[in-house]
Amino acid sequence: EAGVAQSPRYKIIEKRQSVAFWCNPISGHATLYWYQQILGQGPKLLIQFQNNGVVDDSQLPKDRFSAERLKGVDSTLKIQPAKLEDSAVYLCASTTGSGANVLTFGAGSRLTVL
Amino acid sequence: QKEVEQNSGPLSVPEGAIASLNCTYSDRGSQSFFWYRQYSGKSPELIMFIYSNGDKEDGRFTAQLNKASQYVSLLIRDSQPSDSATYLCAVGSNYKLTFGKGTLLTVNP
């Protein structure tokens, strides 16, 4: 079974620039999550999708962050404009959405904002 | 705001000892409880999950859950240097997982 794919693995940008991260979940996984993990902290949920609908985006800074999951498969997370405090690892995870809610994480996308 | 608190660490134990990691949570409606391990520079990987009060054992790992006390723990027996990592407690409700900040464990040879 292929895992959760994420790209790019690393990105360095200047503040006020924009960046986009892509995630392809495990095949058949209906639920997809984007987490932000700042160095030294636990992952913080940004947004949760069930198929192509948003279940929870209460902690997504909507003035600068956006996410979509067209066709209920892969997803894109965008930051525009980036701030210094957005420097973090952006983790995508997926799960079947039923039964045991075991999340499988991708390798993450490390963002550095200068 | 649902909170998950973990003992701050870092925790250092000698090889072969038992490592004990603790976690408390604020949401009494939480339904599922997970322990993830995260090596430096890597993404979290699942160690085990528990739903019911009591103990659940998997090899050298034992998860303990007490819903009345809103407490979950992870015991690692016969700790190995390869167990050195950050251990994340996660609490689930309605297919949403909230993570603690993690506890850094170092196992000294």
Image (cartoon, rainbow, N blue to C red):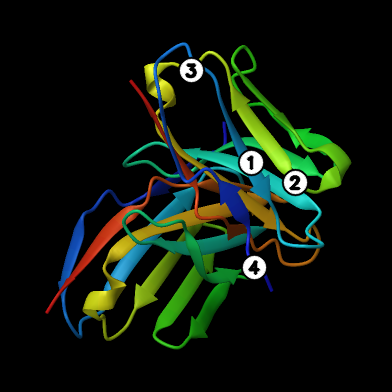
Q: Amino acid at mark 3?
A: Ala
Q: Which residue is mark 1?
A: A22
Q: Cβ–Cβ below 8 Å for labels 4 and 2?
A: no
Q: Is residue A95 above or below residue A67?
A: below
Quick check: marks 1 and 3 in contact, CB under 8 Å?
Answer: no
Q: Secondary structure at mark 4?
A: loop
Q: The residue under label 4 is which amino acid type?
A: Tyr
Q: Residues within 10 Å of mark 4 (few under 14, many from 20)?
A: some
Q: Which residue is mark 4?
A: B51
At label 2, which amino acid type do we have?
Asp
Name the residue located 33 percent from the left edge and 20 percent from the top edge: A114
- Label 2: which residue? A74
Alpha carbon of mark 1 to alpha carbon of mark 3: how far? 17 Å
Q: Which residue is mark 3?
A: A82
Q: Position of residue B100 (x, y in %)?
A: 44, 47
**Number of other residues with Cα within 10 Å of mark 3, as a class: few under 14, some 14 to 19, many 20 or more:** many
In this orientation, does residue A51 appear?
no
Given the image, what chain letter belongs to the residue carrying mark 1? Answer: A
> Going by the image, does B72 lie left or right of A67?
left
